[in-house]
Image: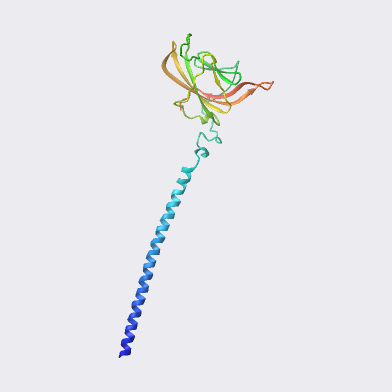
Amino acid sequence: MKLIETQNVLLNSGNITLNFIKLSINKKCIIMRKMFLISAKFLLAILFCLPLLISCGKDVSSNPNNPDNPNNPLPDPEGTITSNISTSTFIGLNGWSLGWISPDNFHFASGWSTGTGYPNYYFVRISVCNLGTKKGLGNIQSIPTNGYSAPTVSSKSIACEVGHGYVFKVEILDNNEPTGEIFHVRLYVEKSLISTSGGIMGAKVKYQYPFEP
């Protein structure tokens, strides 16, 4: 009788131990499952955010769709005109003309005015914004709000730099007074024109007038 009771006690103890082991295993499984789910969610979050992090940290100049990307010449816009300018060849634009003068400058002729005490009657006032290096005319896509400079009355010229883009701001005048009418020209200097003696004699440019982005 005592032997049977002892066996029952041992059996119950074994069952308790087994249940405890099962309970411990279940708890560990639940914990591991939770850890796996958390890890999986964390990994998915990283994979989802990784492209965003890469794009945010990427230099915009390497973006092939960025107009300022020096390796991405955008197509010439509709209405682009290609012309040579020199001391004898000018571009005529609504009351004023643009040419070239030595050593390597744009030259503004008929219709040009600073509008500041110049005694003669002029039709326009011109200011120029040099946008720096561009890959082509199509890469000039907006009108600057500042950064313009005006040629002086004495020189009527401003630097003409190969590979640079420009926006010309033209104000229409009436008896040397602004009328409020303004238009813009975008221009790209493609290359210098070289004389037979090896000197610069002008420039090949592309431009669009009027420029209305």
Identify the image quadrant of residue 84: top right
Is residue 121 positioned above or below 159 on the image? above
Whole-percent x and y of residue 13? Answer: 34, 80
User: What residue lies at 34% left-to-right and 83% top-to-bottom?
Assistant: 10
Whole-percent x and y of residue 89? Answer: 59, 17
Query: What quarter of the picture does the N terminus occupy?
Result: bottom left
> In the current view of this chain or complex, which residue is farthest to the bottom?
1
Is residue 145 positioned above or below 96 on the image? below
Is residue 53 positioned above or below 166 on the image? below
Whole-percent x and y of residue 27? Answer: 36, 67
Whole-percent x and y of residue 197? Answer: 69, 20
Is residue 105 positioned above or below 47 on the image? above
> In the current view of this chain or complex, which residue is farthest to the right?
197
Numbered-mark total: 0
Please say which color scheme the image uses: rainbow
Query: In the image, 84: left or right of 148?
Result: right
